[in-house]
Image (cartoon, helix red, strand yellow):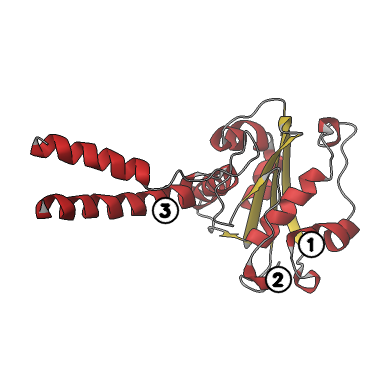
Amino acid sequence: MAALFILLSLLFFSASANVHNVVKVTDNPADQLVAVLNSNRTAHKGSSLYDNPGLACIALQYVKAYQGDCDAVGGADAKKPAESEFAETFAPACGVTVSTLTPITGRLLACQSKYVDPAEVFSEVLMKNSKSLDILYDKNHTEVGAAVTGTDGGSPYFWCVLFSNGKRNSSFALEGGVAKVTRPGCFSGANDACSGASDWPTRPLGLWPYATSALFLVMYAFGL
């Protein structure tokens, strides 16, 4: 029984580490989009950009300003939020200190009628022309922030990537060091588990499912 207890303990803590890693690394489509973007930049001998949560939260507020109007994102009726909204609306909503706002050096926007995964959004939607590639590979960028949100819990889905030339830990600084997590929508850099399809945060189920599985495995191994 002592051996059983030790083995169960080891499996339990192993499961704990695995849950932590999965939630932090894979459960946010905005983080995944930044990972694809940085991988593409480094593959073309560019620098990897710092994923700034303050900038990313502002990217989320940026697309929310479109209020579900896909037609305003591109084409003849394309619009963009007024620059004054960064200081007056977006920064306060995110808890970003207004005095640390830094110029935006590039923007990538997309609106889709259905939700698709970040890798496909990057290659098939955001990288739609040579201008998009120029924005992606611009050497003036030092930081990036990405966001995705649906409208009223469903389609259309808006994707936004904002670039800046700010300095890490000094631009888009967060009051208290933590961005305000607002729903619906997901933004990168916040270590926040988030579902881009449903726009609601995902929560780990805890360790007991893993511990229960481990118990069954041990019972089988010991013939209990």
Q: Image point 74% across, 66% down: which residue? A: 96
Q: Nearer the viewer, residue 167 or 11?
A: 11
- The residue labelled by disc 3 is 20
SS under mark 3:
helix
Sequence-wise, which precedes: disc 1 or disc 3? 3
Residue 78, picture quadrant: top right
Q: Left or right: 5 with respect to 146?
A: left
Give the quarter of the figure containing the C terminus: top left
Using the numbered discs, state the Cα–Cα distance from disc 2 to disc 1 in whole angstroms. 10 Å
Residue 54, above or below 7: below
- The residue labelled by disc 2 is 175
Q: Amino acid at mark 1?
A: Ala
Q: Nearer the viewer, residue 116 or 212?
A: 212
Which numbered tag is attached to residue 91? 1
Sequence-wise, which precedes: disc 2 or disc 1? 1
Q: Is residue 129 visible?
A: yes
Q: Amino acid at mark 2?
A: Glu
Residue 152, above or below 61: above
Residue 68, picture quadrant: top right
Q: Amino acid at mark 3?
A: His
Q: Nearer the viewer, residue 200 or 89?
A: 200
